[in-house]
Amino acid sequence: MITKNFAYHAPADLHGVVTALSAASGTAVVLGGGTMLVPDMTHGKTVADVVVDLSRAGLSGITLDGGGGPHDGPVADDGVSDGRVADGRVADGRVADGRVADGGVVVVGATTTYAHVLSDPRSRTLAPLLRRVAGGVTGGPQIRNKGTIGGSACYANPSSEVPAALVALGARLRLASAGGTREVAAGDFFTGAFATARRPGEVLAAIALPAPTGPCPGYTKLKLNESSWPIATAACVPGPDGALRVALGAVAATPLLVTLDPPEAGVADPAWRAHVREVVDAALAEPWSDVLADGDYRRRVAPVVAVRAVADALQQAEGES
Amino acid sequence: MNRIRLVVNGREREIEVEACKLLVHAVREDVGLTGTHVGCLTGDCGACTVLVDGASVKSCSVLAVQADGAEITTIEGVAGDDELHPVQRAFWDEFGFQCGYCLPGMLLTARELLDRMPDPDDDAIVQAINGNLCRCTGYGSILRSIRCAATRMAASGEPAEEAS
Ligand SMILES: Cc1cc2nc3c(=O)[nH]c(=O)nc-3n(C[C@H](O)[C@H](O)[C@H](O)COP(=O)(O)OP(=O)(O)OC[C@H]3O[C@@H](n4cnc5c(N)ncnc54)[C@H](O)[C@@H]3O)c2cc1C
Ligand code: FES
Ligand code: FES
């Protein structure tokens, strides 16, 4: 039972959302899928005067913005591309050889649920890493049906998967308020445990990802048991220069981005593994500690998940070549 | 107070709720169907599972006002008064529950899985029920029950949806 009542608004578009937020008196909160916010209100961890529900605002869907420029309008609810598909691409965002051309931007609406990512075939080519993340989120189909990518980003729980995935991909978060919109790089968005650069009165409208140009990124996570939240995650996105961009999640308060040399002699090579340990250990100033695992444990497993993500990325690349 | 309209198990209902009322409490107290259980109220246990417009949700994590205009299916809606749905029958025959606290959520989740995937392997079953906690059975008999329901439903040629 939520003990304190509040005013409830479910605006029909993004404009209505930012207007409701700016007009709110008292504490206003944004309701995404509610999987975290509603229980937090039940348990008195969040107390609100106004709740602005995004579920009718048409902010869900995965689209390809061919031009690569900023996309300010609300994202089409049906997820269908808004017509700006650049030359040579088929409607689902692929070029003829099955890869998306350089320079495009994939726009993921903030209220896109994990279930939407999994059921939308375009996510295979446009957001393969988010697709893998979505498939592994626990809590059952009930949570995957309601939980949103944007909600996970805004909640910024260190032990969750979306934040590090967004950092690995070099995502940009599009924040809207009555004063206008701005974009924040994922690397700057996550400022601490349960803390982000989002200001009061701002809503996350969409997440812009560079359209994938290479094979599916590598992904791995370590968890206690089937229904557990992750203790450590790693996503590996190989760069065009061969360097490996690896974002570690759940090991520190905010996602940890490291760049690793490619394993010339294979991922089992002890010298390369020593390099991974050294780079990860140096980057991990203060490991995250919670009920799932303490900081010492996370420090020990961080390089292990990094190695697994690289191995996985190399395997994905082989599978596609 | 907010007046909302729901279609619960096929019957239209109009109720008045405060904005802060959880869907699970509205279903139990205002609609009067107490088969949906309240467990953790954190979104972990799945005892409060209902279908909203065909998709399973944990009704402790949804505000009743959010469901305005929606179709809700609760455990009371999976079979007629004097019958058991094949999934219920399989849980009965395979000892898929003991105290029964988790059961309404477990059955709705199992049925949703079989509607979507009539012949799930064990990995798919585990993935589907990883948001439904059972403190009695240790899950072995639940996996058996779901496999049994799938086999029987395939043999009778009835898709899950029509069997209800
Ligand atoms: C049982 C269970 C198991 C889970 N397992 C996993 C797991 O294995 N891995 C994992 O990574 N996560 C896991 N999660 C967490 C899940 O990913 C998040 O609950 C979900 O993604 C949050 O999204 P939401 O839309 O429900 O957020 P909400 O609950 O709606 O909101 C969360 C917070 O973000 C704010 N917010 C939401 N959307 C916006 C927006 N667009 N703009 C501004 N602010 C916003 C809200 O005000 C609130 O503060 C689990 C959760 C549960 C309940
Ligand atoms: S009561 Fe809703 S998940 Fe436990
Ligand atoms: S039968 Fe008792 S909790 Fe599952």
Image: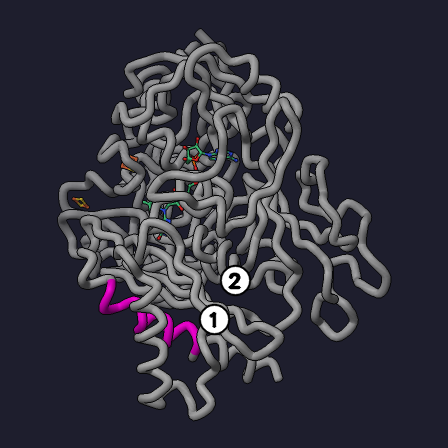
Q: CA distance from mark 2 to mark 1?
A: 8 Å
Residue B77 or residue A187, whichever sits in front: A187
Query: Is A50 on the left or on the right of B29, as rendered?
Result: right
Q: Which residues are magenta?
A: A299-310
Going by the numbered disc 1, the residue's amino acid type is: Gly
Dot 1: few (<14), some (14–19), or many (≥20) neighbours within 10 Å? many
Task: Report the front residue among A18 and B92.
Answer: A18
Residues under numbered marks 2 and 1 in contact, where contact means CB atoms less than 8 Å apart: no
| Chain containing the residue with disc 1 | A
Q: Quadrant of the N terminus of chain A?
A: top left
Relative vertical location of residue A175 with respect to residue A98 in this rendering, above or below: above
Residue pushed farthest right? A87
Q: Residue at 80% of width from left, 54% of height from top? A: A85
**Residue A97 in view here:** yes
- The residue that label 1 is drawn on is A218
Above or below, comparing residue A320 to residue B48 in the picture: below
Q: Circle 2 sits in a helix, a strand or a loop, which is it?
A: helix
Q: Chain of mark 2?
A: A
Residue drawn at x 51%, y 13% is A24
Residue neighbourhood size for the residue with mark 2, other residues' Cα within 10 Å, grouped as few (<14), some (14–19), many (≥20) = many
Residue A142 visible in the current orientation: no
Q: Is residue A276 left or right of residue B118?
A: left
Q: Residue at x 52, y 59 (%)?
A: A131
**Quarter of the rendered image showing ligand 2:** top left
Q: Name the disc covering residue A129, or none.
A: 2
Q: Position of residue B20 (x, y in %)?
A: 37, 17
Which residue corresponds to the image point at 43% horizontal and 41% vertical from the top-left? Answer: B56
Viewer-nearest residue: A173 or B7: A173
Residue A261, relative to residue A78: is it above or below? below
Where is residue A309 drawn, in percent x and y? 41, 72
